[in-house]
Image (cartoon, grey):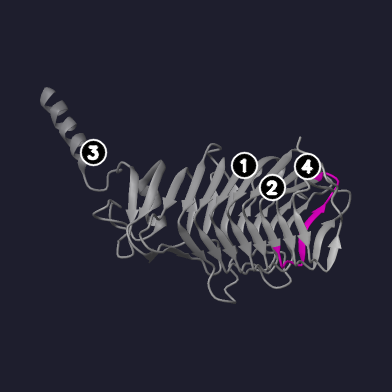
């Protein structure tokens, strides 16, 4: 009986060590333009694509690029960082689909960081959906990225489509978002459209959302009920967009929308800033609103105020004159 027990123990040990047994996930993995997804994604044996590296990377871990390459579209369902730090262009070519989809449906504390990526929707006619689409999770952080050419028709065609159900946080820093949307469509640069009862905070800093076939930045809560969406735009530029540079729209659900614009440039858009809905509040300070077809547009019952430090001129239709308020 003792001999039989020893034999069984040896068999179990052999199975645990055999090829094909579950491998531990690494905290840091690597991809390369000449890698192979059959590799363990180590620095000396990198994977070829982001989807190949995801299952070999622990939650909360990081995927880094070793050299330039096109690393494929990816769906992310856990906390992770995907980063390119001076290793050449880390491309995602996403013709006909999303570049990155974040859907942490089973982890409400999931934070996803995208840094240093070039996300491209492909040539005209590719009808790509969104550069980055956020569905569920705690936070999306986009840093030092370029997102362009997502030209799918409505309801697609966005550089970033941030659409959580309920809570979510978006941070965009030092990022360029250009040439998204189809002419005449609702597409554009950054689209914030939560549903449910949102508790959403958005911070956009040092970012350019320009030359989009739609808006530069738009908040739309017509699909939400109650809650609050707070948006801060600073040190940024929205120019040459075929709709508003920055717009906010609320529906009948009572969701409060507060947009603060500071030290930003809003030029050469069809409308500079546009607020529509009784629960929309725009506050603008130390910003330039010039050379738009219409400078400031106040839609139904919105509140639009200035801190008196803006440069608003050379808009053929000046539009609404914002009352000046002091800092609170």
Looking at the picture, tell me which residue is in the foreground, 36 or 305. 305
Quarter of the image where the N terminus is located: top left
Above or below, 328 relative to 274: above
Q: Secondary structure at mark 1?
A: strand
Quarter of the image where the C terminus is located: top right
- Residue shown at the point (87%, 56%) measured from the top left: 320
- Residue shown at the point (58%, 77%) measured from the top left: 124
Residue density around tag 1, few if under 14, some if 14–19, many if 20 or more, within 10 Å: many
Circles 2, 4 touching at the beta carbon (< 8 Å): yes
Residue labelled with disc 1: 168
- The picture places residue 6, in percent across and down from the top left corner, at 13, 28
* 4 or 3: mark nearer the eye: 4
Residue labelled with disc 2: 194
Residue labelled with disc 3: 16
User: Which residues, given as a range, are shown in magenta?
Assistant: 267-280
Residue density around tag 4, few if under 14, some if 14–19, many if 20 or more, within 10 Å: many
- Residue 132 falls inside the magenta stretch: no
Among the two numbered marks 2 and 4 on one chain, the one whose residue lies closer to the N terminus: 2
- From mark 3 to mark 1, how far is it between C-alphas? 41 Å
- From mark 1 to mark 4, how far is it between C-alphas? 15 Å
Among the two numbered marks 3 and 1 on one chain, the one whose residue lies closer to the N terminus: 3
> Does residue 158 appear in the picture of this structure?
no
- From mark 3 to mark 2, how far is it between C-alphas? 46 Å
User: In screen coordinates, is 87 left or right of 1?
Assistant: right
Circles 1, 2 touching at the beta carbon (< 8 Å): yes
Residue labelled with disc 4: 255
* 3 or 2: mark nearer the eye: 2
Q: Residue 39: which quarter of the image? A: bottom left
Q: Secondary structure at mark 4?
A: loop
Among the two numbered marks 4 and 3 on one chain, the one whose residue lies closer to the N terminus: 3
Among the two numbered marks 3 and 2 on one chain, the one whose residue lies closer to the N terminus: 3
Among the two numbered marks 1 and 2 on one chain, the one whose residue lies closer to the N terminus: 1
């Amino acid at each position: 009986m003792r001999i039989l027990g020893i034999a069984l123990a040896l068999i179990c040990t052999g199975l645990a060590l055999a090829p094909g047994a579950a491998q531990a996930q690494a905290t840091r993995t690597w991809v390369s333009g000449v890698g192979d997804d059959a590799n363990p994604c180590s620095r000396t044996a990198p994977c070829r694509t982001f989807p190949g590296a995801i299952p070999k990377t622990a939650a909360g871990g990081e995927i880094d690029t070793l050299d330039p390459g096109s690393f494929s579209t990816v769906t992310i369902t856990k906390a992770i960082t995907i980063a390119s730090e001076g290793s050449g262009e880390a491309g995602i070519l996403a013709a006909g689909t999303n570049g990155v989809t974040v859907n942490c449906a089973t982890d409400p504390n999931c934070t996803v960081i995208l840094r240093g990526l070039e996300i491209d929707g492909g040539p005209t006619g590719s009808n790509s959906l969104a550069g980055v689409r956020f569905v569920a999770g705690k936070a999306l952080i986009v840093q030092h990225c370029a997102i362009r050419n997502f030209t799918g028709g409505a309801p697609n065609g966005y550089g970033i489509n941030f659409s959580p159900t309920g809570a979510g946080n978006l941070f965009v820093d030092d990022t360029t978002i250009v040439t998204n949307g189809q002419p005449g469509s609702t597409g554009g640069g950054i689209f914030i459209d939560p549903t449910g009862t949102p508790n959403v905070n958005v911070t956009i800093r040092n970012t350019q959302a320009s030359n989009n076939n739609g808006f530069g930045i738009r908040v739309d809560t017509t699909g939400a009920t109650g809650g609050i969406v707070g948006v801060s735009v600073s040190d940024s530029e929205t120019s040459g967009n075929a709709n508003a540079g920055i717009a906010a729209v609320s529906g009948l659900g009572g969701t409060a929308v507060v947009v603060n614009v500071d030290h930003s440039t809003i030029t050469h858009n069809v409308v500079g800033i546009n607020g529509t809905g009784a629960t929309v509040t725009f506050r603008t300070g130390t910003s330039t609103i010039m050379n738009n077809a219409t400078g400031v547009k106040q839609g139904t019952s919105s509140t639009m105020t200035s801190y008196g430090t803006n440069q608003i001129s050379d808009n053929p239709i000046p539009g609404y004159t914002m009352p000046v308020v002091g800092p609170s």
